[in-house]
Structure formats: structure tokens, C-alpha cells
């Protein structure tokens, strides 16, 4: 049996609550995921925690996640995202530490108005960007982020396959990111 089919079979059994299959899946994938995370975060303990957190989430959310076409790709993508989120949180913490010199920092009325205007401009740009998306992707973004439906609920609403929903949302988010990364004055400061 090919590894992809084997992982898929183990995941289906895991979704049905089979702890032995879950344990096997963990055994087969842990080392590769750990090495991948370690290379990204450059810390063995953090990498270990990230991979363990992923497996805990997979077990707890197995029914909601549902069928995964390519289990290995899914878990590697998840570890990548979790590692990036960790690195971003480190940068935020570093930034917060650097800003400790200004504990009594206050916004003036003018700054608050400027920030509200910037938020309004950003919201307007977001609406325009969403309107540029193909119809199906626009629908998926609306259901996911405005109605806060999870993927399984979107599948029920639209009748599409789970992976199709994931793909549409992923592509839409990528297009929105591209749109905002090419916008010259994303958030005028």
C-alpha cells in the first residue's frame, strides 16, 4: 500500500475514533514533522511542542476536520502555519518588550480620528478586494469569515466537497493577500 493511501486509511480510522490508528499515524509522521518545525523555529523544545499540539488538535477536532485527501501534505502545512504563528508571536513579544519604555503612552484625539479613518479606508479596500474575487470564492469568504461557519458547515450549505471548500477559501485568501501586498498605502500611518 502506498504511503498516501496508508495515511488516508489511518486518518479515516482515526476519525472513527480508532486510537490505535491515530497512534500509528503519529508514529509515522512525528519525526518528519518535528524536523520540519525544528528547521523553521530553530528550537527543539518549541518544535516538539508544536508537533504535539498539532496531534492533540487533530485528535480533538478529527470529526470536524473530516476527510483529508493528502494527510501528509495537510499535517506539514499545519505545522508550517503553526511554526509561522509561533515566530510571529515571538516578534510581537520582542516588539512589546522594546516598547516597555513607554508604559503611559496615550493616543491624542487626532490620532484616534486618524486611526478610525485608516480603519475605514482599510475596510473599504477590503470590500473592493472581496468584490474582485470570483463568485464562488467570494461566497466561501463570506460564509467562513462573516458568518463564521466552519468548513464542514460550508460543505453542508454549498453541497461542495470538503477539499473544494478548503481550496476555494485558500485561493481567495491568497488573492486577498496578493491584493493587499501590492496596494501601496495599505495602512497609512
Image (spheres, grey):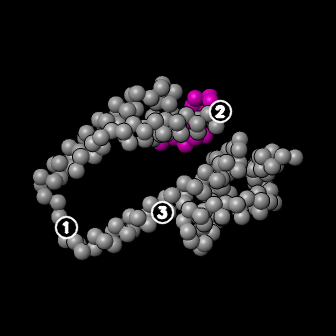
Q: Is residue 59 left or right of residue 184?
A: right
Give the labeled residue for mark 3.
87
Query: Could you tell me if the residues under marks 3 and 1 are in contact, i.e. CB atoms within 8 Å?
Result: no
Which residue is located at x 67 percent, y 48 percent?
73
Q: From this viewpoint, is residue 16 visible?
A: no
Q: CA distance from mark 2 to mark 1?
A: 50 Å
Give the labeled residue for mark 2.
161
Instruction: Please tell me whether mark 3 sits on a helix, a strand or a loop.
Output: helix
Whether 110 is drawn above or below 51: the answer is: above
Which residue is located at x 77 percent, y 50 percent?
7
Q: Earlier in the sequence, mark 2 or mark 1?
A: 1
Query: Could you tell me if the residues under marks 2 and 3 are in contact, i.e. CB atoms within 8 Å?
Result: no
Whether 146 is drawn above or below 95: the answer is: above
Residue 31 at x, y = what percent?
A: 71, 64
Snapshot quadrant of residue 129: top left
Q: Which residues lie in the magenta part? A: 147-161
Give the labeled residue for mark 1.
105
Q: From this viewpoint, is residue 98 visible?
A: yes
Amino acid at each position: 500500500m502506498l504511503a498516501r493511501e496508508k495515511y488516508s486509511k489511518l486518518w479515516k480510522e482515526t476519525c472513527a475514533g480508532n486510537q490505535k490508528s491515530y497512534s500509528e499515524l503519529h508514529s509515522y509522521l512525528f519525526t518528519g514533522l518535528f524536523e520540519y518545525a525544528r528547521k523553521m523555529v530553530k528550537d527543539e523544545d518549541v518544535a516538539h511542542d508544536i508537533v504535539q499540539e498539532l496531534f492533540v488538535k487533530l485528535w480533538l477536532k478529527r470529526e470536524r476536520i473530516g476527510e483529508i485527501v493528502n494527510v501528509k501534505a495537510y499535517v506539514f502545512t499545519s505545522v508550517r502555519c503553526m511554526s509561522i504563528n509561533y515566530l510571529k508571536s515571538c516578534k510581537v513579544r520582542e516588539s512589546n518588550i522594546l516598547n516597555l519604555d513607554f508604559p503611559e503612552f496615550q493616543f491624542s484625539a487626532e490620532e484616534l480620528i486618524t486611526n478610525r479613518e485608516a480603519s475605514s479606508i482599510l475596510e473599504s479596500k477590503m470590500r473592493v478586494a472581496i468584490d474582485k474575487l470570483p463568485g464562488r470564492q467570494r461566497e466561501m469568504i463570506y460564509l467562513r469569515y462573516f458568518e463564521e461557519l466552519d468548513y464542514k458547515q460550508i460543505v453542508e450549505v454549498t453541497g461542495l466537497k470538503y477539499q473544494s471548500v478548503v481550496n476555494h477559501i485558500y485561493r481567495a485568501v491568497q488573492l486577498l493577500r496578493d491584493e493587499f501586498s501590492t496596494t501601496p498605502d495599505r495602512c497609512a500611518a
